[in-house]
């Protein structure tokens, strides 16, 4: 048995889910509900922290083995859109070399999503820019290794 408040909350949640599904598409919606790869990595080989023009910050952590990304994670203090973009950006880096990751820009993240709100597209560029900065960190550390 549900009271009017429960029914109101259920309806509100269903409405938010539907609006988010419409805005992000199915893949983005699923990722919004289950943000994979989210969390700090305790011992990354490389990382970067970038604050976007919107004021939100993203941090990306990468682990490499034989020049390929074997593990990746992100955290952000930004909106749901930045979390979705961070999740896809690090997923796209998995298994790739630094050279291959160079192709992952904001447009590539948006293409992977398929659909995304125009006003949130900058979140994809923040995610991709942070990923590129993390790879840059890897290259610098690699060069300074004996
Ligand atoms: Fe700032 Fe999404 S609004 S990253």
Image (spheres, rainbow, N blue to C red):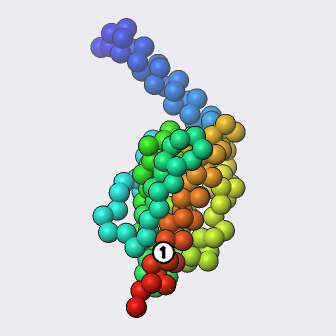
Q: Is residue 96 shown above or below 75?
A: below
Callout 1: CB less than 8 Å from ligand 1:
no
The front one of 90 and 114 is: 90
Q: Residue at 65% x, 55% y: name it.
A: 106
Q: Which quadrant: the N terminus?
A: top left
The front one of 142 and 8 is: 142
Give the total number of marks visible in the rendering: 1
Q: Residue at 48% x, 51% y: name it.
A: 58
Where residue 9 appears, as percent x and y from the top left, is 40, 18
Q: Is residue 119 shown above or below 87?
A: above
Q: Is residue 80 visible?
A: no
Ligand 1's quadrant: top right
Where residue 100 appears, as percent x and y from the top left, is 62, 74
- Residue with the mark numbered 1: 138
Q: Is residue 66 visible?
A: yes
Q: Is residue 98 left or right of residue 116?
A: left
Where residue 11 appears, as percent x and y from the top left, is 47, 19
**Considering the numbered disc 1 on the image, is that residue within a helix, a strand or a loop?**
helix
Q: Residues within 10 Å of mark 1 (few under 14, many from 20)?
A: many
Extreme residue toward the top, this view: 4
Q: Residue at 42% x, 60% y: name it.
A: 73
Q: Which quadrant: the C terminus?
A: bottom left
Extreme residue toward the bottom, this view: 146
Extreme residue toward the front, this view: 144
Where residue 16 appears, as percent x and y from the top left, is 51, 27
């Amino acid at each position: 048995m549900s009271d009017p408040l429960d029914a109101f909350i259920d309806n509100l949640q269903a409405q938010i889910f539907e609006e988010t599904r419409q805005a992000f598409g199915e893949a983005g919606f699923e990722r919004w509900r289950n943000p994979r790869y989210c969390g700090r990595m305790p011992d990354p080989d490389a990382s970067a922290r970038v604050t976007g023009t919107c004021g939100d910050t993203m941090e990306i952590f990468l682990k490499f083995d034989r020049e390929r990304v074997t593990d990746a994670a992100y955290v952000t203090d930004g909106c749901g859109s930045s979390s979705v973009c961070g999740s896809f950006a690090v997923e796209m880096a998995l298994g790739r070399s630094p050279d291959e990751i160079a192709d992952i820009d904001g447009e590539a993240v948006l293409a992977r999503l398929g659909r995304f709100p125009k006003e949130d597209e900058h979140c994809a560029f923040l995610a991709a820019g942070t990923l590129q900065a993390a790879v840059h960190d890897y290259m610098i550390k690699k060069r300074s290794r004996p």
